[in-house]
Image: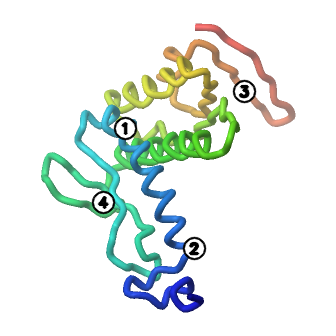
């Protein structure tokens, strides 16, 4: 039994990786619900089955439904990477809430990444985040992208000079 649990089995899979794969599959399933909306059903996250760098089954690829091919995540553009990362973060928060026995994750903060997005992708990502409000979540966006200021209902502006910083709330 000790050998099987330690990875000496036909899949070279430790008990730890088995459990991680179980949860990763759930996270990916939730993430794909968001990613489908953000990418117009073009992309799906998939768990790589092959062993790579000792991370048996723990690496993620992206399946492109337009080309019908699996792509390594390093081949994604900045906008595609942002969408995939956002989908994974939201999928993780959903699974944590489902599995945690009552823990509620009511706030999410996104720090940057918006500068890599074209206008259409920016709108889609922002719509996704603003729609989280309907589920009772508060979304904080930390960004220097000026286009966001017009779409976000309440903005906390932080200004700083050489000696001090100041803040103010602004409603749109």
Report the front residue among 34 and 150.
Answer: 34
Residue at x 57% of width, y 73% of height: 16
Res. 158 mark = 3
Task: Identify the residue at image location x=32%, y=32%.
Answer: 37
Residue at 30 percent of width and 48 percent of height: 44
State which mark lies toward you, 2 or 3.
2
> Disc 4 versus disc 2: distance between alpha carbons?
29 Å
- Residue 33 is marked as 1
> Mark 2 to mark 1: distance in Å?
27 Å
Is 125 on the left or on the right of 104, as rendered? left
Q: Nearer the viewer, mark 3 or mark 1?
A: 1
Query: Tag 1 or tag 2, which sits nearer the N-term?
Result: 2
**Residue linked to disc 4:** 75
**Residue 166 circle label:** none
In space, the residues marked 2 and 3 are separated at their CA atoms by 44 Å
Q: Is tag 2's residue or tag 3's residue first in the polypeptide sequence?
A: 2
- Packing grade of label 3 (10 A; few <14, some 14-19, many >=20) is few
């Amino acid at each position: 039994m000790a050998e099987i649990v330690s990875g000496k089995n036909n899949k070279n899979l430790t008990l730890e990786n088995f459990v991680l794969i179980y949860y990763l599959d759930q996270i990916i399933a939730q993430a794909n619900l968001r990613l489908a909306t953000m990418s117009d059903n073009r992309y799906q996250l998939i768990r790589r089955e092959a062993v790579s760098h000792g991370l048996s089954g723990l690496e993620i690829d992206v399946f492109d439904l337009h080309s019908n091919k699996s792509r390594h995540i390093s081949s994604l553009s900045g906008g595609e990477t942002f969408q995939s990362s956002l989908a994974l973060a939201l999928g993780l928060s959903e699974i944590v809430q489902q599995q945690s026995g009552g823990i509620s994750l009511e706030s999410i903060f996104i720090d940057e990444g918006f500068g890599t997005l074209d206008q259409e992708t920016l709108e889609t990502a922002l719509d996704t985040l603003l729609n989280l409000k309907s589920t009772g979540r508060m979304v904080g966006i930390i960004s220097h992208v000026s286009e966001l200021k017009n779409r976000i209902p309440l903005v906390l502006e932080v200004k700083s000079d050489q000696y001090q910083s100041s803040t103010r709330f602004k409603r749109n």
